[in-house]
Each structure stands twice: as C-alpha cells, then as structure tokens.
Image (cartoon, helix red, strand yellow):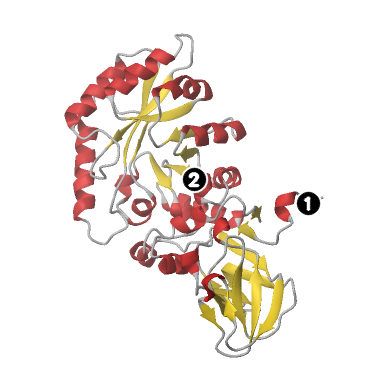
C-alpha cells in the first residue's frame, strides 16, 4: 500500500547509480592512498542523506561529512562503522554525544576545547577533533600560526580529547584566477610545517580542487560535494574536469487538469498572464511550497518531449503551463531532467534563479518524496 506522501504524482527521482559512478570516477583519478569524504550535509544537497551515503560508501567513500550535530546523529543512527566528520561549529555541550557516537568535531578555539572536555566523563571514549584553518575564507577557523600552536597544545594537554585532523577550505578553487587560491595554499602549508606532529588526516581539497588542482593538494583525503551529485562547481571546472559527471537529480509530476481557454482569459493570481489566443492550459500539482518558487515563472518544463512554459504566477501547491494541444490527465511532466531529445538541467534553473546549482536541489522541500533508482 502506498504511503500518503506518494499519492501525489510530484516526486524527485534520485539516480543512485549516477552518484556511485561519480564517486568511482573520482576514486580512479585520485592517488591510491587518498580517502574520499562524501559530503552529505543538508540532506545530501537535497538528494536524501541516508540513501546517498550508502551509495557513496558502496562506491568507495570511507568518511561521511555533515554540517550540524543533528545531521551527524541522524547519519550515525543509520551507519555504525564509517567515520562521521561534522564540518561546522558545535556547542561544547554536544561533546559527550559526539564522543559516545564516535563523531569527529571541528574545532577552532582553545576555550572551546576546554569547555568540551568538562562535559566528557573520564571513562568515556576520547573526543576526536579536526582543527579548522581559516586560510582565507573568513568563515570559521584559526587565523594565525600562533592560534594553531595554542589550540594544538591545548588539545595535547587536555584529557579525553585527541587531535585527529587538520583542514582548510578553499574559496576560489573553482575559478580560473588562482591568486587567492595560491595564497590559501601557502598559508595552509605553513600551518602544516609548524604543527609539532602531523595528525592522521590532513584534507584541504573540496570538489573543485579535487578535480582540477595539483594532486599534491589531495593530502590524506578530499571532500567530495557537489560533483558527487553530478553537478560541476563552475563552468570553468566543467570545461576541464577529468571525467564527465552524471546528474543524479530529476523532478517530475503529471498533468492533473487540462482545459481550453479563450483569447483574453487571465491565468493565476494577479491575472498577470493573459491568453494571446485560444489555447490549451494544463495544471501541475507542484508549487512554491515544494521549492518551485515564484521566480521560476516562465521556466520551461517538458511534456511529450517538448518544452512548454509555466504561465501565470506559481501558486503554493500548483502551477499552470501553456500546452500546444490537449493532453490526457496523467501526462508526465518533467521539470528537471530529460524527455526525448530535450533536457532541463539543474544548471538551467540556477541561471533562471540567478543562483548556483548547489541551491536548486536544496530548495526542493521535504514535501516532495525522493524516489531512488
């Protein structure tokens, strides 16, 4: 019997084989000893964290990365073995939960280490930490060699915490201009050179750096994010990537109503669209509460292998499309994906929304069920 969320024909289709292929292709490209950290934060960029994590692990990833304590606990509840790295800031009060669940935390302040240690019982498992180096992103991280040595010494002298890793994040690895990127690399290298003892895992390369930068920056591991999902971090990276990416995300629905309207008839809230001639109009059960936000008005969808535009204002739960002819109720509508020779890509939506492709699958809300191939 179908669950309630599957009665509505609107659904996101996630191709897990595409995700596996993207991981396998990266694994072949990396040096043999380099580990892949599969980034499954934000519900795996909207694709579904548990299913994507399993696909990534099956394809050769060894570590899972998230952004929040809640995400980390959710992933640990489904995966008992692999390392889980929490990339964002955590409250010190989360430390005992992280230690118990073997979740690795990011740290960038000596005071935090001391506070976290006070929450951990002496008999507990040690809390593993990765020091975040702010080499030029100016988000979180230590910003000087002195800060690095201070936090290193604090960790070394504090019971029940241990240094497991050191990492940074590049701000412009996906751009052709390398000036800022090289500055970040040089600072991170200086940090590596002064740390008294190299930790188990050093990692710096995000997706873009993993694909197009010098292999020496692979260190012990790389963090594989956007391209695990078949999307390029930028057009520059896409043009020189060492292998083709396989998009994993499609968005589909069906026509639930079809009617003919007359020239001059208005469509939708505000009567912003006026039929220029007698025409056929279809209604699709998807709207801005599903992530198809109103700025996507005019965006084309695929019906019967043809591109047709969304007309009128997108509603909370529905939108309307101009049809070339009458179609039966239940006719498939592809909002993102391929029909016949035509493709509506995530990147096309990103251009329409004046944003980046990362944002598009993330804004498709939980009301849209993810169906896995």
In the drawing, does residue 206 fall left or right of residue 229? left
The residue depicted at 26 percent of the width and 62 percent of the height is 176
Residue 180, placed above or below residue 94 = below
In the drawing, does residue 124 fall left or right of residue 130? right
Residue 108 falls in which quadrant of the image? top left
Point out the tag, 1 or 2, that comes first from the N-terminus: 1
Q: Is residue 341 visible?
A: no
Spot occupied by residue 248 in the image (x, y as percentages of width and height): 55, 59
Judge the density around disc 2: few (<14), some (14-19), many (≥20) Cα neighbours within 10 Å: some
Q: Is residue 151 visible?
A: yes
Which of 350 and 268 lies nearest the eye of the viewer? 268
The residue depicted at 28 percent of the width and 59 percent of the height is 175
Residue identifier under label 1:
2
Q: Secondary structure at mark 1?
A: loop
Q: Quadrant of the C terminus?
A: bottom right
In the picture as drawn, the residue positioned furthest to the top comes out as 122
Marks 1 and 2 sit apart, C-alpha to C-alpha, by: 26 Å
The residue depicted at 58 percent of the width and 45 percent of the height is 58
Residue identifier under label 2:
42
Q: Secondary structure at mark 2?
A: helix
Which of 88 and 176 lies nearest the eye of the viewer? 88
Q: Which mark is residue 15?
A: none
Spot occupied by residue 328 in the image (x, y as percentages of width and height): 75, 77
The answer to whether the residues at label 1 and label 2 have Cβ atoms under 8 Å apart is: no
């Amino acid at each position: 019997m179908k669950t309630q969320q599957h009665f509505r024909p609107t659904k996101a289709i996630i191709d897990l084989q595409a995700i596996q292929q993207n991981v396998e292709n990266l694994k072949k490209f990396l040096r043999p000893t380099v580990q892949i950290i599969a980034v499954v934060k934000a519900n795996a960029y909207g694709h579904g964290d548990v299913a994507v994590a399993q696909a990534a692990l099956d394809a050769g990833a060894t570590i899972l990365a998230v952004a929040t304590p809640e995400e980390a606990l959710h992933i640990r509840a489904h995966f008992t073995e692999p390392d889980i790295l929490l990339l964002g800031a955590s409250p010190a009060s989360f430390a005992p939960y992280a230690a118990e669940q073997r979740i690795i935390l990011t740290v960038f302040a000596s005071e935090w280490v001391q506070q976290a240690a006070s929450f951990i019982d002496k008999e507990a498992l040690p809390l593993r930490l990765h020091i975040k180096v702010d080499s030029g992103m100016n988000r979180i991280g230590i910003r000087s060699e002195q800060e690095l040595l201070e936090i290193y010494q604090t960790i070394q002298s504090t019971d029940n915490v241990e240094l497991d890793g050191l990492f940074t994040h590049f701000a412009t690895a996906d751009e052709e201009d390398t000036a800022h990127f090289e500055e970040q690399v040089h600072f991170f290298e200086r940090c590596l050179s002064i740390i008294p003892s190299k930790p188990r895992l050093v990692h710096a390369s995000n997706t873009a750096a993993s694909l197009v930068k010098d292999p020496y920056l692979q260190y012990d591991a790389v963090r594989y994010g956007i391209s695990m999902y078949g999307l390029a971090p930028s057009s520059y990276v896409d043009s020189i990537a060492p292998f083709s990416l396989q998009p994993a995300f499609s968005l589909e629905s069906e026509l639930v109503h079809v009617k003919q309207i007359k020239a001059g008839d208005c469509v939708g809230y505000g009567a912003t669209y006026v039929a220029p001639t007698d025409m056929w109009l279809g209604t699709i059960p998807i709207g801005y509460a599903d992530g198809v936000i109103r700025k996507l008005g005019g965006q084309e969808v695929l019906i019967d292998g043809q591109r047709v535009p969304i007309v009128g204002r997108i509603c909370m739960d529905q939108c309307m499309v101009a049809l070339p002819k009458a179609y039966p109720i239940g006719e498939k509508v592809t909002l993102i994906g391929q029909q016949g020779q035509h493709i509506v890509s995530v990147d096309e939506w990103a251009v329409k929304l004046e944003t980046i492709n990362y944002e598009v699958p993330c804004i498709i809300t939980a009301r849209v069920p993810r169906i896995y191939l």
